[in-house]
Amino acid sequence: MAISQPATRPANPRFSSGPCAKPPVFDLAKLSDAPLGRSHRAAVGKAKLLAAIEETRDILGVPADYKIGIVPASDTGAFEMAMWNLLGARPVEMLAWESFGAGWVTDVVKQLKLDAIVKTADYGHIVDLATVDFDKDVCFTWNGTTSGVRIPDGETIPADRAGLTLCDATSAAFAMDLPWDKLDVTTFSWQKVLGGEAAHGMLILSPRAVERLQSYTPAWPLPKIFRLTKGGKLIDGVFKGETINTPSMLCVEDYLVALDWARSVGGLRGMIARADANTAAITDFVATHDWIDFLAVEPATRSNTSVCLKFTDARIEDGAAFAKAVAKRMETEGAALDVGAYRDAPAGLRIWCGSTVETADVAAMLPWLEWAFEAEIAAQAVAA
């Protein structure tokens, strides 16, 4: 017996975890004010870059004495820049519970060759934050984009810590509360929660991080693209829009448009509420379907942006093949694009629920998920 398809599809089936869905109001015509063909060092270029920095500060509530810079190579470039400039002055503790955190561990241990304490947790879990020594420099992801596991809050980070906290917040910024007084270095990219274009990273430094930059010289050489100081002084222009390398002014304009949209939906509080509503729709679905569950074990650590799911039905013979087949069916039908689990993660689905996604689209996608599951179970039975 054929399984009936749902009657409606999402208006926007884009649920990729990066690059993520554009804001609902996106239109190429909105980028017409981009100063194309002009130098980013011209007055108009500098003004746009500074506006991007200050709008970021205002919407996220970043303290006035924190520095915000636009840097090359997305969140990866921003976090690498932070590690290469700041680590080595104190003992280091590395925390990882998904692939990107594991990548930072590899870079610190094998590239910088620091004798770091490494604490890891399996996918779906998080390290015991109460055991972390914050008198060391500590590196971590706030939200595990590939595991759907996030830090619930900053309560375990002491205010009187001696070390620096280096936080990769790329799938958290604009959708989660980030406790700025507990974060010394924070990085993210435009293409996550705001749905901006790729290749540009944001680097946010506390006064403590700036003091480290100006008082410590790493033992290793720094490529030009990483350098944040000159003669022991911060290159302050980086944090006023004078970028290290040439930015795309088209991407900058796109980011400004996204920031303007974020303000229109209530700023940070509105953005968090949108992501929470999207995730709540999936939570309700999981609660009423016994063949699927969250990868994140503890509800308090479940992401509200990169929602990772696993199939739990005992009839499934090959979990990886089954999950890929379900994702393929949904893509073929135009119901959900790019929802397969990350390549290093356990088999399953990863559905982006960040603030640019409409809850109505999540609600319209979920019946297709049920249809694809039942269709694949039936196909598996026929093949057997």
Image: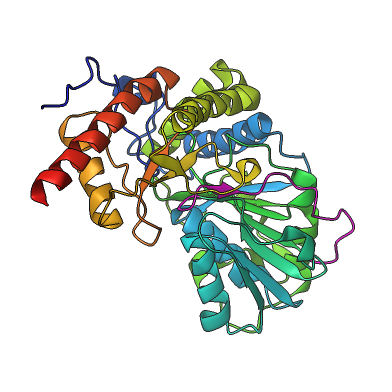
Q: Image height check: is 115 above or below 58? A: below
Q: Position of residue 16 (x, y in %)?
A: 35, 40
Residue 49 locus on image (x, y percent): 53, 39
Count how many numbered circles sit on residues in the image.
Answer: 0
Q: x, y (%) of residue 173?
A: 58, 40
Residue 198: x percent and y percent?
39, 46
The residue positioned 28% from the left and 48% from the top of the image is 315
Colour mapping used in the image: rainbow
Q: What kind of secondary structure does the magenta stretch mostly adopt?
A: loop
Q: Taking the image as drawn, is residue 185 in sight?
A: yes
Quadrant of res 112: bottom right
Depth check, front residue: 265 or 342: 342
Q: Is residue 199 left or right of residue 147?
A: left
Asked if the magenta segment contains residue 117, the reply would be no
The answer to whether residue 197 shows anywhere in this view is no
* Quadrant in which the N terminus is drawn: top left
Q: Which residues are magenta?
A: 145-163
Q: Residue at horizontal 30%, vertical 30%? A: 370
Q: Is residue 68 left or right of residue 106?
A: right
Residue appearing at x 71%, y 33% in the figure? 61
Question: Residue at 39% across / 21% down in the picture?
Answer: 363
Q: Is residue 246 left or right of residue 322?
A: right
Q: Quick check: is 161 in the magenta stretch?
A: yes
**Up-down: is 194 above or below 237?**
above
Quarter of the view holding residue 291: top left
In this rendering, position of residue 127 left or right of residue 310: right
